Image (cartoon, helix red, strand yellow):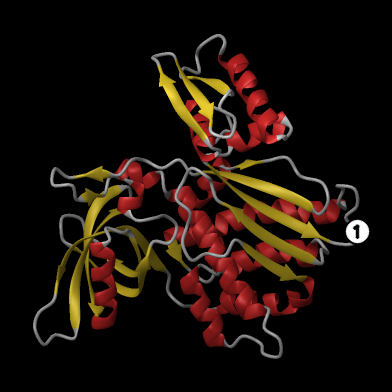
Amino acid sequence: MITSDVGPEELASYLSRSGWVRARSGSLAELWQSNADIGSAVLVPRFIEADDFRRTVEILTNEVARLERRPPEDVLRDISRQFLDVTDLRAQDDDIDEGTISLQSGLGLFNAANHLMVSAAAATIHRQGYYGRSIPRAAHAHARRLRLGQTRPGSYILPVISSARFGATVRDSDGIPHLDVASEDAYFDRRVLATLSRSLETLAEITMRRGRAPSRSDILDAVDEGVSTELCNAVLEVIEKGKVEIFDVAFNWAPASPVPADLQRRVVFSSENASVLTQVRDELKESDEPSEIVLYGVIRRMSLKQNEDSGRVTLDTVVEGKKRSVAFDLDLATYRRAAQYHGERRRVIVTGTLDAPAGRPATMLVSTFGPDRSIASFDDLG
């Protein structure tokens, strides 16, 4: 379950990132000192079950807040978010006043939160322009696991909280990392947010252009990045049904977890573009393009024969909850990129048509291949 409870790991993470150093360590507690004020020290309890745990955390928070000249509640909030990704859904409109929002707009924002996360989770599992009744159960299960934070005043902001506490990298005896099913499950929440970020960025790119409507090719290509009818509907919940002028989504990555590479931190939509979004939604709904499976994993083997125009790659991945090796061919340019990621020990993402019969080798016809931008390399995580 995702919670914002404060434990020893959150305390140590926040202190180490705020200029504190561990001065002494014992079986029950640790003593940390501030680099900014040598005379300041705090006690970090190591057992949540201890009777005085909450009181010790309160004393620690007050001392840190005094040095940072901030309210203790703000410091405690930041400590609690060390392993949490927070996605801020913001509605901006002249009608929003003193932290209040119209019922219609508020309903649109809350509905959009659920629909955005479900559509992104579905696209993290397999790419499809229109899901309808075929949204994977795991996508709905993921949305039920998320938490909502308190809304914030000013422009109306709804925080969606997800876990960014990853499993440890598992390595073979020779130091080479390998895939572990339990560890891979820990990355799903972050991968959903990475899918959401990229899909919203792509949707904004094709709908916010001035003077040119997106072509059918633009729209179908966007499916590769996670854009779907359901994603469009989620945005339209706010700017069309909710009658909100500006809707933006900001991604605040957990301070103690690897920050995704090459992803925008904020994506903005305007009610002026509602008609174009509707066009994209309708085009995707009418498309009969086949869905494609999404696999995440680490490259285990590579082979390239002389005078061949493609190379063979074998990926260690997870298929239907079980570890599986999947082989596929890549053109030479893509194969060279795969060799780079293999050398960096970096996870990759592959989409395409999967053939994985029970008891026989699994293969894939690949349509897209690239680095897993939701997390860092194995070495960074190890």
In x, y percent, where is residue 221? 49, 79
Q: Position of residue 276 (x, y in %)?
A: 70, 80
Residue 227: x and y in percent read: 55, 70
- Rendered image quadrant of residue 62: top right
Mark 1 crowd level (few <14, some 14–19, many ≥20, 10 Å Cα): some
The residue that appears at 61% across and 58% down in the rendered structure is 116
Q: Is residue 365 left or right of residue 89?
A: left
Q: Name which residue lies at 51% across and 45% down.
A: 141
Q: Is residue 363 above or below residue 162?
A: below
Q: Is residue 131 visible?
A: no
The answer to whether residue 343 is above or below residue 70 is below
| Residue placed under numbered mark 1 in the picture | 95
Looking at this view, name the residue that lies furthest to the left.
Answer: 306
Q: Nearer the viewer, residue 64 or 249?
A: 64
Left-right relation of 356 to 196: left
Residue at horizontal 43 percent and vertical 61 percent from the top:
373
**Residue 299: x and y, percent?**
24, 61
Nearer to us in this view, 21 or 106? 21
Q: In terms of depth relative to the viewer, which is nearer, 20 or 313? A: 20
Q: Secondary structure at mark 1?
A: loop
**Count of numbered labels shown in the rendering:** 1
Quadrant of the frame with the C terminus: top left
Above or below: residue 26 compared with residue 130:
above
Q: Amino acid at mark 1?
A: Asp
Q: Residue at coordinates 48% horizontally, 69% vertically from top-left?
A: 128
